[in-house]
Image (spheres, rainbow, N blue to C red):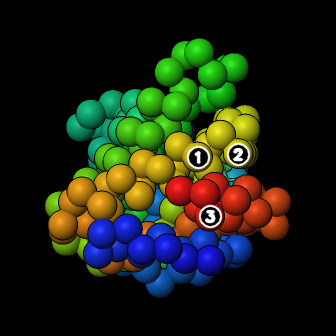
């Protein structure tokens, strides 16, 4: 499924984000930037050691990445040229600013994409795996934040593709996108 917002397109597909050849893929990282399971593990495995080397350099400079923020590294051996690492909120019930933090993940990744003049970016469903964010609520925050960014920002990437790992997550995102 896809929809246009301003001059940008939001596309939803099911798949493995490590295979995407968009200009950048987004990693659902943790504050350490040192890797982990889920998308993070898959990206480091497929992209090779150059990604971790740059993450370590960023850690040395700024001491990790707070929730809601984003940093960019090489894509290493991935088809994508860059990895944008962002740290989603851990879901603890919804009253610890989880929606605001999740929205700022998407916005900050898109700002970095604009800074680098990228034309296409692929996102996973940030926070809905190990971090436990309910998928319907996460889809709502993710899609409304990206749609608003594309509508307002002329230099936004022309394509934002959500690459969703399983059919249930794809369906949740499709329901929300249809209703925006
Ligand atoms: N491609 C696309 N989506 C994937 C892939 C893949 N290759 N692998 C998993 N997913 P998670 P989080 C989906 O846990 O909730 C890590 O250990 C997955 O099914 O990767 O933000 C980090 O180091 C789910 O729908 O990210 C952090 O410690 C979604 O991606 C922590 O997990 C997100 O699941 C971050 O947790």
> Helix or strand or loop: what does disc 2 sit on?
helix
Q: Measuring 26% from the left and 66% from the top, which residue is drawn there? A: 156
| Residue labelled 2 has its Cβ within 8 Å of some atom of ligand 1 | no
User: Does the image show residue 42?
Assistant: no
Relative image position of residue 125 (x, y in whole percent): 61, 54
Work out whether 35 lies above or below 168.
above
- Residue 140, numbered circle: 1
| Residue labelled 1 has its Cβ within 8 Å of some atom of ligand 1 | no
Relative image position of residue 89 (x, y in whole percent): 55, 31
Viewer-side label of 2, 3: 3
N-term-proximal mark, 2 vs 3 = 2
How far apart are the alpha carbons under marks 3 and 1? 11 Å
Q: Nearer the viewer, residue 14 or 10?
A: 10
Circle 3 residue: 178
Circle 2 residue: 136
Q: Measuring 44% from the left and 40% from the top, which residue is drawn there? A: 103
Q: Measuring 69% from the left and 20% from the top, which residue is drawn there? A: 93
- Residue 69, numbered circle: none
User: Does the image show residue 161?
Assistant: yes
Q: Residue furthest front?
A: 179
Neighbor class of circle 1 (other Cα within 10 Å; few <14, some 14-19, many 20+) is: some
């Amino acid at each position: 499924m896809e929809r246009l917002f301003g001059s940008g397109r939001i596309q939803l597909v099911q798949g493995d984000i490590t295979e995407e050849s968009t200009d950048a893929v987004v990693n659902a990282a943790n504050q350490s930037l040192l890797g982990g399971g889920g998308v993070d593990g898959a990206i480091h495995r497929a992209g090779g050691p150059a990604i971790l080397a740059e993450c370590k350099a960023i850690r040395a400079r700024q001491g990790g990445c707070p929730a809601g923020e984003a940093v960019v590294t090489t894509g290493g051996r991935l088809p994508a040229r860059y990895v944008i690492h962002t740290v989603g909120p851990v879901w603890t019930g919804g009253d610890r600013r989880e929606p605001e933090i999740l929205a700022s993940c998407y916005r900050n990744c898109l700002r970095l994409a604009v800074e680098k003049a990228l034309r296409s970016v692929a996102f996973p469903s940030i926070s809905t795996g190990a971090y436990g964010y309910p998928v319907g609520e996460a889809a709502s925050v993710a899609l409304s934040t990206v749609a608003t960014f594309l509508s307002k920002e002329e230099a936004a990437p022309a394509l934002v593709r959500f690459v969703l790992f399983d059919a249930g997550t794809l369906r949740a995102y499709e329901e929300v996108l249809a209703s925006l």
